[in-house]
Image (spheres, helix red, strand yellow):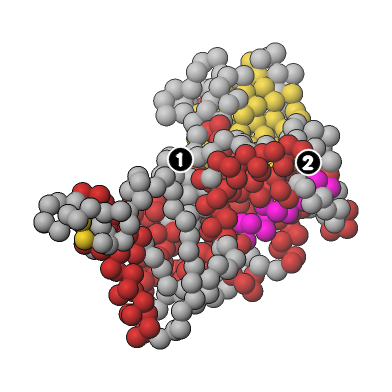
Amino acid sequence: MPSEDYRRGKLLPDPVTPPDTVCFMIQIPNAVQYRAAFLGQINVLGVASTWDHPTNGTECLDCEQAAQLWRNAIYNATWSDECGGDMSCADVADCIENDEAVQAALIAQLGSAGAGNVIYETTVVGQPMSITTRNGTVANGGPSCDLDILFGSVTAIVDQLNQNNTDFLEVILLSDNNQQRVSKVIKAIPLLNEVPIDEVLDFVSELTTEIKENYDAQYTSALRDTYRCDLFCIAQDDPDCELTFQNLVEYFNNRIGTSLEPVNFFGSLVTYFIAGTWSGTSVVDILSLIQLSAWQQASDFSGISLRTLQTVGALGANDPDHDWELICDDCVSEECDDIKAGMNDWVFLDPVYGTYYPGEGAGRGTETSRIGMMKQFTGMTVTQFRVIVNEDITGLTTGVFPGYNSFGSETFGVATGTSFLFYGNWTNGVAWEVIGTGALPPTLRVVQICYKAKPS
């Protein structure tokens, strides 16, 4: 009991600061006056004199501490029409990304599923993805490459990319004016802070006038199936039966045929997007590529991280889908030309762009900064090709363009490891090049070129 030197107030606990908090929900009559009265009563707890306090004016540090605890609680309180309710997608994503207990539970669940799925390396928001992370798995068919499991995993990824696009466009739809739209788009894609403001305004305007109005109409079940089947075949080509994040970037990049600066891919993509006219399925392709490039350069799109996408793919593997047997054409087998054994009808773009070394492969020519080759595929369409070299060329610029002797526009990429890969539809011929910032190593050799080709 308080001494005579204390007036009787509300009792303080010991210690004054408990180790945790508790959520106390109460529904009150919904009127401004009742809210004000209710809040007024609670505010009393944020006053030091409410608690057992000296009558002689001596400072009571415990009382001040208790009052501050309550002021913090009152400040952070929120009004809601409903108590509780379902978690939003953002809440779920936040739990997956930040709650160690949730992550551990997911890992345990996925590990017991028998599909060989794991939670992969996370990313740091605001930082570019490492090459290792970009080559990390987002979908897979398990150790035995079960095609039903693989298709379920790929389907989950395709559906998540579309959901992310749709949620992002909702941000624009729910904005009352252009200033709000710009603010919300920058919040969803923080990388836009690095883009000149006039380009940001044009970017948001283009999203509003061409993408938002047409996206839903263009994202049809047929396009969804195209994405699913294409990516399903790409994953089957992987020795580990996996689809990587880099596969996704390359796939959508090649669908729209961009010719972008690899070092500043996102900034180049914004400029490219503003200058273009978007219609048909390219509306979906370009927004998907914007989403992927934001992840690639800042590991964040609308508050969603790569870990979330990887988890979606892993969970999708637990929902096997055999629809591929009904909707997908047979995957075209990859063929490979052994360049060490001969040129196999590949020729250099120009004699200065290469030299053939019997038994070794193709190396640089008198133009030492690049190697460029082409091959004619009469009556055929090449949908994928891969160039393998004998040395690590990570970070070097790569390019591909359609045709043979007479070429279309070039699409650029970046090499990783000892190879580079492109997807597309090149009719009758295809040409490629690898470009150094200076002279290429004199010992660099192209040793193998693999491709998929089908009748045009």
Residue at the spot of label 1:
124
Q: Kindly state the secondary structure of the residue where label 2 is placed.
A: loop
Place of residue 52 in the rendered image (x, y in percent of width and height, measured from the top left): 25, 57
Mark seen at residue 319: none
Q: Residue at x 53, y 33 (%)?
A: 131
Expressed as whole percent of the image width and height from the top left, the position of residue 20 reads 44, 48
Closer-to-camera residue (360/54): 54
Q: Residue furthest right?
A: 325
Residue beneath label 2, please?
Answer: 113
Query: Residue at left 53%, top 74%?
Result: 82
Q: Is residue 272 left or right of residue 115?
A: left
Give the magenta-colored segment's residue range: 148-162
Label 1 environment density (alpha carbons within 10 Å; few <14, some 14–19, many ≥20): few
Which amino acid type is shown beneath numbered disc 2?
A: Ala
Q: Is the residue 240 above or below the residue 17 in the image?
A: above
Residue 160 coordinates in the image, percent (x, y): 64, 57
